[in-house]
Image (cartoon, rainbow, N blue to C red):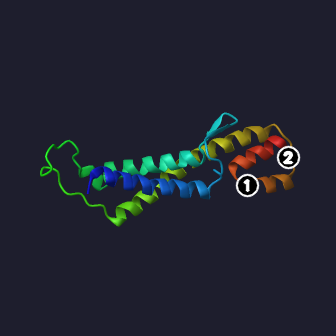
Amino acid sequence: MNPWICALLISLAGMVGGMVNALLTDNKFIVPKLKNGILCPGFLSNILIGATSAFSSWSFYGSGASIELAKTTATARQDISLTFSALAGAFLVGVAGAKWLTNEVDKQLLKESVKEAAKKDISPEKCDKIITQSPRKILEDIQQA
């Protein structure tokens, strides 16, 4: 199999993983946007990070690490196979890579929420309601309180 086709399939599996993460989290917007100076990744960024994470993992540590692209003759280049486990691994790495980015953004949003909450007097009932929401929604509710 052509090494570039393998790389493309691995990246596509990572993209699907990034999509899954975007659908499971609070990234219900397409493009990245700023919220209180914090860059929230959005759907497209999750897909890009998923693909990049999967391709990087496959090319550094997976079967892609042994591929030599600079050999000039067809006989010098070895046959490449792509296993289902490599695609499944790329999918999981895509989810994990995008989740890492999402967690970092959520951490920044929660830090900003704490700064805002320190300035306000919030009732215990409202506080109990706020903490059940996503980090982005928590910040919005605290700013409106």
In this rendering, position of residue 47 left or right of residue 37: left
In the rendered image, residue 18, in percent from the top left (x then y), is placed at 51, 53
In this rendering, position of residue 82 left or right of residue 92: left
- Residue 32, quarter of the rendered image: top right
Disc 1 marks which residue?
Answer: 133
| Viewport quadrant of the N terminus | bottom left
Do residues under tags 1 and 2 come within 8 Å of each other at their CB atoms? no
- The residue nearer to you, when weighing 122 against 52, is 52
Disc 2 marks which residue?
Answer: 122
Q: Is residue 1 visible?
A: yes
In the rendered image, residue 55, in percent from the top left (x then y), is placed at 38, 49
Q: Secondary structure at mark 2?
A: loop
Q: Amino acid at mark 1?
A: Gln
In the rendered image, residue 111, in percent from the top left (x then y), is placed at 67, 41
In this rendering, position of residue 48 left or right of residue 90: right
Q: Is residue 85 above or below residue 131?
A: below
Mark sitting earlier along the chain (1/2): 2
**Alpha carbons under labels 1 and 2: distance apart:** 16 Å
